[in-house]
Amino acid sequence: MSDTLFSSDVETADTLHLGRQWLGDLLDLALSLLLGWGLLRAWDVSRTPGRLIAVTAGVWCVVCLVGGLSGWTLGQALVGLRLVRGGGVLGASRGAARVPLALVDLLVSPILQRRVFNRRLGLEAKSVPPWRGGLPWKAAWLALALAAVWFMVVPTRTETLRYLKTLDGWRCCHGRATSSPSRCTNAVSRAVREAASGDAQAQSVVADCPTAAAALGR
């Protein structure tokens, strides 16, 4: 989607870089979903739709609030924009106001071809190359995104203990060939760490897993 899709004869604060603003908000929303999913996996709780929506909404609030205080969000930075008010940051109040209003603008701006609530809040999109300005904030957002991906890739405690009780897990525990050697290694290492920390369920699984029991006894 390009800015020309939303172009008009007269560019105002709420129509300037409209396409990039829309994409930036969409990326921030995707980042919130990614972080929400990563948090649920890090907490090792069931990932029901309601819980995912609630956590994602909480992360979206933080994204908007921190964006208001710092002037930077990862999504807007990736498309080369920074939302400002009078040349400075938005502030906590306007950052908080963007929590619901940015979502509304995300839905209606392709139709109305303007950012209705940006005008009401006195916000303006300033074009800034992605590699300039706010680098610590951009790095922090990127680090959080990578951490979320890490938690999505690495098996949780529950997944690890459940795997070691399967047929493939039995092969893993008894030194037999498995369909995924790396998963076997990671599961044994995680089970040993959990058992060493005093987790009763992990200790029970390790006791029935010779490979893990041997590693724990070293």
Image (spheres, rainbow, N blue to C red):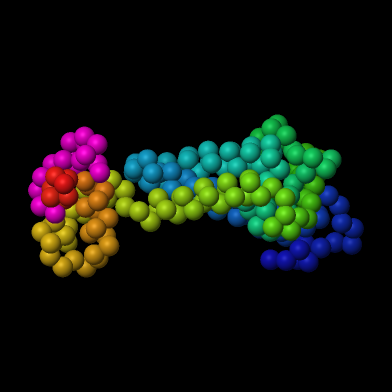
Q: Is residue 100 left or right of residue 56?
A: right
Magenta segment includes 77: no
Q: Answer above or below: position of 218 versus 174.
A: above
In this view, the residue farthest toward the front is 218
Q: Which residues are magenta?
A: 193-211
71 displayed left or right of 10: left
Which one is in front, 205 or 23? Answer: 205
| Vertical position of residue 144 compared to residue 182: above or below | above
The residue lying at 60 percent from left, 42 percent from top is: 63
Main SS, magenta region, reads helix
> In the image, 89: left or right of 27?
right
The percent coordinates of residue 16 (x first, y second) are 81, 55
Q: How many marks?
A: 0
Residue in the picture at 78% in, 55% down = 127
Image point 57% across, 42% down: which residue?
60
- Residue 180 percent coordinates (x, y): 25, 65
The front one of 193 and 108 is: 193
Q: Position of residue 86 (x, y in %)?
A: 84, 40
Q: Can the viewer see residue 205 in this picture?
A: no
Choose between 83 and 48: the one closer to the eye: 83
Whether residue 127 is visible, yes or no, is: yes
- The quarter of the picture where residue 81 lies is bottom right
Q: Position of residue 91 (x, y in %)?
A: 73, 34
Q: Quadrant of residue 217?
A: top left
91 lies left or right of 10: left
